[in-house]
Image (cartoon, helix red, strand yellow):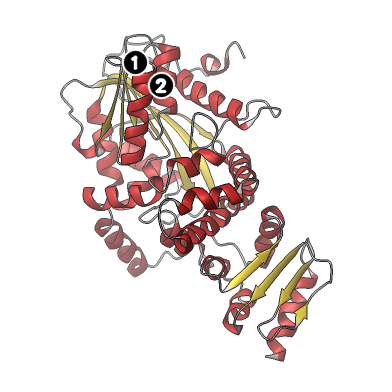
Amino acid sequence: MDTLIRKIEAQLSGLPVPVALQLPAGERVGPAKAAVTLAFRDWSGLATLAAGQIGRLAEDFVESRVQLEGQMRDLMAVAARLLPGTPVSSDTGWWTQMLRRAKSVAHHSPHKDAQQVQFHYDVSDDFYALWLDPRRVYSCAYYRDASLSLAQAQEAKLDHICRKLMLEPGERFLDIGAGWGGLLLWAAEHYGVSATGITLSKNQHAYVQRLIEEKRLQGRVRMELRDYRELDESEGFDKIASVGMFEHVGQANMAAYFGKIHRLLKPGGLVMNHGITSGGVQPGQMGAGMGEFIEKYIFPGGELLHISHVLRDMAQAQLEMVDTENLRPHYARTLWAWSDGLEARLGEAQRVLATTGHADGAAKILRAYRLYLAGCAMVFEQGWIALHQILATRPDGQLQTGTLPGAQSAYPFRREYMYGGR
């Protein structure tokens, strides 16, 4: 045990903020005035800390085997330094990859996807409202100006997507995974499109239905509780957006997902896929137990792919990528804004969650989300995962379509239109 304590003391000495540990027997290790204090109920947690298994340590916190005192930003600065190396998966063995694909197939039936989405998004609308912006946009914001607030940056993101898609009045627009309706309603109100959104979350569906009625947008905006695989392909959409949704699709279904989008999109139309991508080239979870933590407490069934795999699957579905933008630091700042917002209202969050179930369960959910938001902010800052907006077309085969010969779509093959007038 002395060897373990000496190893931990050596680790603590090199950290960017002072850290103290309360050992199971009551002994304290570290400075008297520490920014972060971790109190352990048993010795196994200390072994986890020494091994740099950050995800397992996070699970110990959620399950009350470890108690935390300190700010989330300080804790994440410590966590980044405790890792023994990069947590980006590098296991390329054929057996590992085959097992991952088999797991992906098993976890992404329509029934499973609905359960997994509802596990996360139906926790409590009031809980999410405490730390999201007023539009409840639950995806990466766009800080086109460093001085923007979270709410302003989310509106900037909504407009950024609409500009990229070149939305025009009267066009049929589809939002796959429409969340609480931020993009769906923005596109209808600011760009005059006929908008359809889909979600698997019962809470989100009910919430957006109320907004549609309050804003008197019936007939122009429709929200459906529907799996993307069930969408009718007969009419087609001029423009499609998928924001923060394809992380739930799964590696095994990615080709079918983009194939479905190709069939839903009219020839010459544009699609925007906005989603989290892996830092590792091969499919797999984050290491050091971080992937397992997210799977268990936050996003069951979530899978991330490297941007190269996403582009390959899009190309195989005959969607032509015309623009790709990495917003990784924007998501780090977004997540810190969410984390800070939640940390400022912990008492209220606990009370809100307690109304959805037993108090003990509510406390666990809150602890999990505190680590999830701050941990993801740190991971995006480190560059271990990213966020890509991919704009693609379904070429119509007509060489004279568009502003340049051979464009075969409305896309102008210039970027000025995305940023003009700003």
Q: Point out the image quarter for the N terminus.
A: bottom right
Q: Position of residue 320 (x, y in %)?
A: 36, 29
Q: Position of residue 71 (x, y in %)?
A: 70, 55
When asked about the image quadrant of residue 308, the answer is top left
Residue 282's disc is none
Residue 217's disc is 1
Q: CA distance from mark 1 to mark 2?
A: 9 Å
Q: Position of residue 113 (x, y in %)?
A: 28, 49
* Residue 328 versus residue 325 in the image, above or below: below
Residue tagged by mark 2? Answer: 185
Asked if residue 72 shows in the view, the reply is yes
Q: Are marks 1 and 2 in contact (CB under 8 Å)?
A: yes
Front one among 63 and 154: 63
Residue shown at the point (53%, 55%) measured from the top left: 366
For disc 2, the neighbor class at 10 Å (few under 14, some 14 to 19, many from 20) is: many
* Residue 316 versus residue 73 in the image, above or below: above
Considering the numbered disc 1 on the image, is that residue within a helix, a strand or a loop? loop
* Residue 232 versus residue 298 in the image, above or below: above
Amino acid at the residue labelled 1: Leu
Asked if residue 285 shows in the view, the reply is no
- Which residue of the protein is positioned furthest toward the left in this rendering? 234
